Image: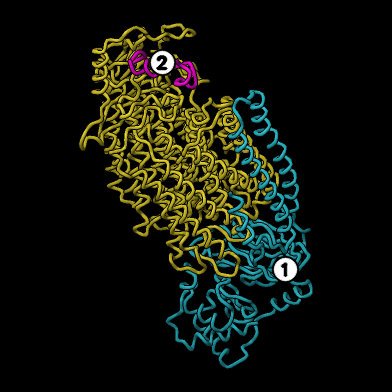
Chain colours: A yellow, B cyan
Amino acid sequence: MTQRSPRASIEDPEPYRGPIDPALRRAQEERLLRVWENPRGLRYWSAVNNTEVGRWYTSTAFLFFLFGGVLALLMRIQLAIPDNDFLSADQYNQVFTLHGSVMMFLFAVPILEAVSILLLPQMLGARDLPFPRLSAYGYWCFLIGGVFVCGSIFFDAAPRGGWFMYPPLTTKVQTDVGADIWLLGLSFIEVASIAAAVELIVGVLKCRPPGMRINLIPLYSWYILVVAAMILFAFPPLIAGDLLMELERLLDWPFFDPARGGDPLLWQHLFWIFGHPEVYIVFLPSIALVAMILPTFARRPMVGYTWVVLAAVGTGFLSFGLWVHHMFTTGLPGISLGFFSAASQAVAIPTGIQIFCFLATLRAGRVVRSVPMLYVFGGLATFVVGGLTGVMVALAPFDFQAHDSYFVVSHLHYVLIGGTVFPLVAGLYYFYPMVRGKLLRERPGRIAFWLLFVGFNLTFFPMHWTGLLGMQRRIFTFPAGLGWDRLNLISSVGAFVLAAGFVVLLVELLRPRGRDPWAPRNPWGAGTLEWLGENPERPWGVRSVPEIDSRYPLWDQPDFMREVDEGRFYLPDAEEGERETLVTSAIDAEPLQCLRLPGNTFLTLWAAIATGGAFIFATFEWWWPTLLSTVAAFAFIVAWLWTGTSTIPEKPTKQVGLGLTLPLYASGPASVGWWAMLITMLGDLTAFVSLVFGYFFYWTIHAEFPPAGTTGPGVLWPVIGGALLLGAWALTILARRCNRLESGFAFQLSLVAAGVLAVAGAAALVAAPRLTGLDPTRHVYAAIVWILVVWTAVHAGAGVAMHLYCMARRAAGRLTSRFDIDIANVALYWHFVAFTAFVTVAVIAGFPLVT
Amino acid sequence: MLVRLLLPLALLAACDGPQSALDVAGRDAERVARLWWWMAAGAAVVWCAMVALTVACVRVDPRRHRDRAARVLIIGGGTVVPVVVLGALLGYGLASTPELLALPPPGGLVVAVSGEQFWWRVRYHPNDSDVAAFELANEIWLPVGERIELRLSSPDVIHSFWAPSLGGKMDMTPGRVTRIALEPTRTGVYRGACAEYCGDSHAFMNFDVVVVERAELVDWMERQALPAAAPASEEAARGQRFFLADGCGACHTIRGTAADGVVGPDLTHVGSRARLAAGMLPRDRAGLARWIEQADRIKPGSHMPMFGMVDRSHVTALAAYLDGLR
């Protein structure tokens, strides 16, 4: 039930300017407080509010960063002198694998999501993100998975395949549990990352304040939108790769075994299709922080806003076309080398545009000296070095030498520490007063900066040289006499200087600050909405959701802060005792709906524990506990959905202030849930496409595919299966229609029929390779057919569970003709299942006929 | 500030070393090194320009700001300059790609190198013959001034062949054969290494490239193609008996004897090599004995069993025999 906002779209409504009754204001504040207050005691951990979850998330990611840093120090001790035996080869291999994996999967990506969960609602003047419980669930998954993966090293069971886990080393040689911990533990976290990406995309698109049209969005939010979309398309190929590798390890399906038609290079493609965008996923959010900090201290709006946005989008697009530059030495033809060299150089251009927009802003403004700016400048100077060496290694001929040497180690740390860590520390100093209400002191910030900056360059600058002198990556020791001794010693000393910088920062962070005064409100004099927050903090986020007509409302809109505080804008009250925020249209930010948000719950924690159990028990191949955990996770998630989503409001509409009345319920494309389903399924589809890519990849490397003498799954059973699944899809859509027509019986009947067809269709699909005797352990052809079939069948199975859920909801009166989010989203899910089934049948049954 | 910090570092570091990509001894390494020096100089200029520009942008009086100037800065600095510079670099850099990938005309000497955990199996195919003339391990002899094709493969996991002084690296992927050509310009011994992480002893997987004049190479190839020398002393003869009786031949070949195993290195002329165990030990009697007794301790994950339990006199006899296989 979409409903356009009743007000004219061009003329913005003016807030009421007259006097405000102080008693009313106090009563409103009390009600808001009651609704948004955090629970106390142990129940505190049931909080789902973005501020709490964001704090936990950020601190946890930072702890994992420190853990990864300690691992780095161990490596630097080992490499300080030649022929050192501080660590054994096996220990060193675990340490470097975990260092890379922790920094990438447990720090770099999560910290951006953590910071965004913390900042985004404030920046958008929203009370919370649209799916607070999803954020909480994602956080708990991250914590459990992260502790599991990190903890493995204390049991000498950590993964030891390097953070890119190349098979066959990781499939044939390293058969211990380490690789499974990597594959399952990190897949679990990747799922949480995708969940956060969905949350952030919907947040930026649908939860902006009225009037914040697409050209007024704060730059940080723009970047997060780009990055979240990148996560959505970059992580699924890795998850698909993880699935293939785990199947090879567990069931001996030969995806990467050349003896049986597999190819180790498929993993490299899938990994780097993820891995290269990953670099930008990590780097862009930090640039986004710079894009917020820099205008504040230049006292000037960002110059070239549109350029920055286009450059960020362009970087996102280009980053998906570069992955092959990680594979320049695999023996590719010259034409591929040339193409991917050129593409890799091209990405320097949007990056350059962003930097020059920053410089133009500095030039236009009068720069105020501050600790955050010190880190911004330090980051810039460092990152430029990384960018320049990046241009070098992007050039295939030079990469033939630099690849897999310490030159690359140096390059990537210049990019990641210069581009990510320095801006993050800048962000830490900048946003700390917003989050904690107190300022961090300047002096430790400056001392830490110089330690970090000098230590960093001392560690990593010599590594360019070490690499050119022939030192390859990932060797646990080296002999004397190759000219590497002194350089390595300098790097090791530098690493400890760098670590000292972090210790200084850490001490300043953890220092008790009870006696410090509260920071003034908006201490840096910034122009964006996140600085509306009061010190000490009030739990409701913004006192009233403002109407915006500028990129820097605090600078440009007179009396803005006072009017927000006095509740003169939207949703100044919580009359019904519900958590609420505004949903607006994606382009023009027209108010569409007053969204009721679910409150605190332990369900998400239980669901995460059960999900974690399923992954962790599977690692050790304890199948009964795995099954139990899966069932429990399913039950908790259903309970969470049942109680916390698609709740029917007590009245259809609500006055939200400024004379505006908005619906309390929306379904279909007008609802945030529908968008979340759409976005999630785009990610799911990407994983499926990655598997299909695998099928055609194998086709390109084999002269005959299907191999001679193999009968494929035939045509009959796949087509029957596909037709049945399409039937289930049609019946699901019919059910949605019946529901709309108030025909409850027809609704239930069509869903029963849809479920039966879906089960039959899945069975027919699985029967296809089974009846034709395709043995997935014999040849990769059979294995890839099986994985496509199983993927489709599992999706059909999940679809049946959704059918049952909708039937129960309808029977319980929680799904009606008007309040129909559930069936609308399930129908949307089934569009994707239908497409998946169609593609699977076309590939496994149709393609062999064509070739 | 950074320059002051880093310049001494750069001066501290020399370019030379047996495994240095900048101490060139091959045509390909020479091309890449030249590219590097150009890029390094260019990068230094660009970095200094960026820092200078940043300082200028911070210092300049904001009242002098003009929108047009800002646009010029963004478009000029962000697009025009990079397009020109990167275009030129790309043209210059990629122009050398065909030369780097170029293989010598077919029919010449082909050296097949197989990367195996954790050593290098080297087979010589004169005139690209189907059957190798001989096989050795961890040592590659090449003629100076000639471009020679290397055919790279792996039976177990991914390795990468890298002799930095001679040229770039190339992966050795199971299921594939990759090709690279090297063209040494100076005689001498150059160190190579496995560049792709391949397991526990990845650090211990090195090789030597011995670059000699053509005549010397021909001489060496003839000697390598001969069957193994007969034991020259009583001790060596005992060593040979142990070698054949204790099952060493299950893994190792010594042409001219019954030992014809193919799992480990061919030892027909092991006494002619400079080093043992992919660069881990000197090839002398002591080194041989140590390797026989504690292979896995010297090189974790090695497939060579440790024969520490064997009687000491056995081991010295074996070492004497193998040492004599010149």
Q: Is residue A622 left or right of residue B131?
A: left
Nearer the viewer's eye, disc 1 or disc 2?
A: 2
Up the image or down, A91 lies above or below B231; here it is above
Q: Is residue A462 left or right of residue B184?
A: left
Q: What span is colored magenta in the figure? A: A548-571
Which disc, if any, is residue B313? Answer: none
State the residue at coordinates (38%, 20%): A824
Between residue B322 and residue A77, name the one nearer to us.
A77
Which disc, if any, is residue B142? Answer: 1
Quadrant in the picture for residue A356: top right
Q: Chain of mark 1?
A: B
State the residue at coordinates (48%, 44%): A241
**Label 1 Cα neighbours within 10 Å, binned few <14 / some 14-19 / many ≥20:** many
Residue A23: x and y in percent read 23, 13
**Label 2 Cα neighbours within 10 Å, binned few <14 / some 14-19 / many ≥20:** few
Q: Amino acid at mark 1?
A: Leu
Query: Circle 2 is placed at which residue position?
Result: A559
Q: Is residue A213 visible?
A: yes
Query: Is residue A505 covered in magenta?
Result: no
Residue A500: x and y in percent read 43, 53
Image quadrant occupied by the N terminus of chain A: top left
Query: Is residue A555 covered in magenta?
Result: yes
Q: Is residue A252 visible?
A: no
Up the image or down, A224 lies above or below A461; here it is above
